[in-house]
Amino acid sequence: MGHMIRNEPSLSLHIPQPKCRPGDRVDFSTLDLPAAGEARRPDVDTHPDEMHDMAYGLIRVLDDEGRAVGPWDPKLDGQTLRKGLRNMLLTRIFDDRMYRAQRQGKTSFYMKCTGEEAISCAQSLVLHHDDMCFPTYRQQGMLISRGYPIVDMMNQIYNNARDPLKGHQLPILYSARDYGFFTISGNLGTQFPQAVGWAMASAYKGDSRIASAYIGDGSTATMDFHHALTFAAVYRAPVLLNIVNNQWAISSFQGIAGGEATTFAARAIGYGLPALRVDGNDFLAVHAATEWAAERARSNRGATVIEFYTYRVAGHSTSDDPSKYRPADEAEKWPLGDPIERLKQHLIVRGEWSQEDHQALEAELDAEVRAAAKEAESIGTLGKSMPSPKAIFEHVFKEPDWRHIRQRQEAGI
């Protein structure tokens, strides 16, 4: 029999496309951005079924004038705010210096977190020093905020003789257990189930430490993300599951990972987890949401999914040219602004900061980064200095087998 003739439309696929491409006029007018102070603040013990709306709104504290408004205002003192501003500014100056170093051939690779500094720097002030963070390559602000020596970060980036990881990691894939900073994984997404497993172990042992994991919008489309949410929900793991939605995953926009259909925070609902959607460029909002989720985890109420709505100002990495896939001025038009400028304005409005104070701090931090760079470069940059060849065989296996021993003997080291 031949095919039956049906009076039905042909099927077609929907291929998500960003609203603007290079050369287009930037248009963010379709974004749904609730006003600062508009989001309600549920009690920490609220059942996830009673707060589905939090996955679709946006927690904002700082208004357009720099004032803190609404129920999510964490009521931070000036000293804490100035510390946060310093950490964010130091992170940006460090980033800029290392980016230039890569362009000068001093290292092979670098990735900036420009525009996303509030997320790691605000969270670091809330989480305890011994809570374990499972970061991606854009949470360098957490190490800086926790006082990890920036010269050691540079030595790792240069893979020189004083590289704390002895050449076992790519540049910017830091690891610092004593600072609650788990080894960065180059396989994106793996840090989510790792964090949930660590948090489950902490609870199983009756410990008091919680975990915090980070993932980009693109990596939410991987199976690791969903495995992590399943285990976190089933076992009520004491973990913060942070989705950093910076609009771009390498050269594909967030709609390819599902962000066009709904919010990333909404994915928590299907797992029975509470979700918060937060202005990631608002230091106070990030701080407040982190406090809420951390208190929930510490009181055995389980995990929280937090989507931080932000924008990746720089390229994906030094290997990326964002002008090939988005308008050159898109970052300047991002409606949620710059996290550093917004916190600076808030402090000025409070009468606890000035433009002169800010310029002095910039000069101080620039000198600090320059001094660290001079020290690191005196040890050596990429290819001009390297760890001992013995390091190839160290910190790999707890107990080396005979092949490992034989290889070392044959190498004469």
Image (cartoon, helix red, strand yellow):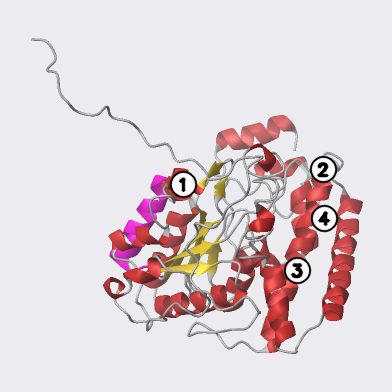
Would residue 141 be seen by someone viewing this image from the given angle?
yes
Expressed as whole percent of the image width and height from the top left, the position of residue 57 reads 42, 68
Please report contact status of discs 1 and 3: CB closer than 8 Å, yes or no.
Answer: no
Viewer-proximal residue, 127 or 51? 51
- Label 1 belongs to which residue? 255
Q: What amino acid is labelled 4 in the image?
A: Arg
Q: Name the element at disc 4.
A: helix
Alpha carbon distance from label 4 to label 2: 10 Å
Tell me what residue is drawn at x 48 percent, y 74 percent: 209
- Label 2 belongs to which residue? 103
On screen, 121 above or below 218? Answer: below
Alpha carbon distance from label 1 to label 4: 32 Å
- Label 3 belongs to which residue? 89
> For the C terminus, which image quadrant?
top right
- Label 4 belongs to which residue? 97
Of the numbered discs 2 and 3, the one sitting upstream in the chain is: 3
Of the numbered discs 3 and 4, the one sitting upstream in the chain is: 3
Please report contact status of discs 1 and 4: CB closer than 8 Å, yes or no.
Answer: no
Q: Please give the range of residues in magenta.
A: 222-237
Tell me what residue is drawn at x 78 percent, y 60 percent: 94
* Left or right: where 373 falls relative to 292: right
Closer to the eye: label 1 or 3:
1
> Magenta segment, principal secondary structure?
helix
Q: Where is residue 279, by image quadrant?
A: bottom right
Alpha carbon distance from label 3 to label 4: 12 Å
Of the numbered discs 1 and 3, the one sitting upstream in the chain is: 3
Tell me what residue is drawn at x 58 percent, y 45 percent: 186
Viewer-proximal residue, 334 or 27? 27
